[in-house]
Amino acid sequence: MESVDPSEQVVLVVSAPSGGGKTTLCREFLKAFPGVSFSVSSTTRPPRPGEVDGRDYRFISTEEFRRKIEEGAFVEWAENFGHFYGTLAEEVERPRRLGMDVLLDVDTRGAKSLRARFPDGVFIFILPPSIEVLKERLSHRGSEGTEALRLRISRAMDEIQESVWYDYLIINEDLRASIEALKAVYTAEKIRVKRQGRRLRPFLRE
Amino acid sequence: MESVDPSEQVVLVVSAPSGGGKTTLCREFLKAFPGVSFSVSSTTRPPRPGEVDGRDYRFISTEEFRRKIEEGAFVEWAENFGHFYGTLAEEVERPRRLGMDVLLDVDTRGAKSLRARFPDGVFIFILPPSIEVLKERLSHRGSEGTEALRLRISRAMDEIQESVWYDYLIINEDLRASIEALKAVYTAEKIRVKRQGRRLRPFLRE
């Protein structure tokens, strides 16, 4: 078995305002690169119909969540509408020990914490093609009233302001092209010089 | 016509020790992206059979070359075996004015000068799969004696030492995979946040 060099690992972090098309994109990416490990978030909110524990989320109790916060087990966590959401460090560390790359799907707040922890991580922001499309996608989604919609739009716009510090921006106009873009980012990041020390070393003089 | 924003331009710089397979790679890349302008180097050496002026090189007189050096027209130039070789700034500036990206194929010394002039340039080093393959490729190439071959290998090894400051490393084991890697680098670099200011701006608050 080849030894594992953590400096080679690619930590891909994808964020998007809701309505950005992130979920489909990540799913298609993982189909193309089944060797990439998907980081499953933990939450205290109850599963929705169709959601599978360990695939969509790790559904844990509030007590367990709090205990893990105490232990410093989360790389990032937040409370939203009375429920906790977070990413366990193990979601990145376990694949790293196996020499696998990781894909994380987190909001901009979570991404910021991940940036601090994994400065060599690759941060990708998914943007809808225009503000109009964003509004349209958000309004198609909910059964909520105008006020709730307004809040969703405002929060999406807040998230978008954070995109400036990401590395890559995928404007999700055409799903196929966006998938190709995400795959290209991964393929390119894999061959960065900084991740190829092991391949390069035999060529270097002392 | 859309206005041109130079901050969006991708300046791709490819280097490889001879025997690295760079020429084929660049040619195939340009077939896939015909909108990318190829920077043609200038030289004072006479054309070899089959070489076309303006395609393979711009063949100019030593007098003209010296005059252009005086004028500061070169981004990089060097003298090799009594002949001058160089890249005119115009090779990058002209496509830039047209909103085009540029591919340059230069040695590591030239690449270093380009890095100083275009710090946002994308630097890609092509490496043979092993030192053995490098030696084999170099010895297949020449009709020279052992001493000349030894010199070529030593110079190739010198060039490889420089690869550590490049951005990407393509290990040219399989031509098809290497072309895909080069295309992925370009596709990824096109969507870097820093190159998408124009697309992002409408979403940003003051």
Image: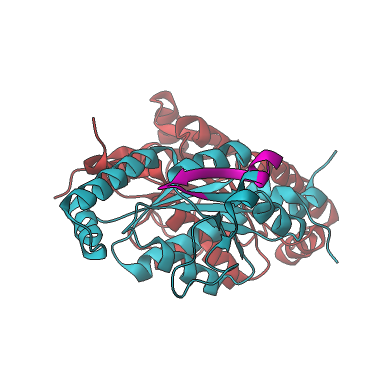
Chain colours: A red, B cyan
Viewport quadrant of the N terminus of chain B: bottom right
Where residue B18 appears, as percent x and y from the top left, is: 34, 56
> In the visual, does B46 lie left or right of B36?
left
* Residue furthest front as drawn: B63
Q: Is residue A31 left or right of residue B11?
A: left
Residue A64, relative to residue B203: is it above or below? above
x and y, in percent, of residue A63 in the image: 43, 33
Tell me if residue B63 comes above or below residue B37 in the rendering.
Answer: above
Quarter of the image with the C terminus of chain B in it: top right
Q: How many marks?
A: 0
What is the quadrant of residue B108 in the picture? Answer: top left
* Residue B196 seen in the current view: no
Say which residue appears at 74% left-offset and 67% top-offset: A140
x, y percent for residue B63: 62, 49
Residue B75 among those drawn in magenta? yes
Closer to the camera in the image, A84 or B105: B105
From the viewer's perspective, tell me whether residue B185 is left or right of residue B88. Answer: left
**Would residue B115 be counted in the magenta stretch?**
no
User: To which quarter of the image does residue B141 belong?
Assistant: bottom left
Q: Nearer the viewer, residue B159 or A22?
A: B159
Residue visible at 68% across and 67% down? Answer: A173
Q: Which stretch did the figure color magenta?
A: B67-84
- Residue at 74 percent across and 50 percent down: it is B6
**Relative to A42, is A198 on the left or the right?**
left
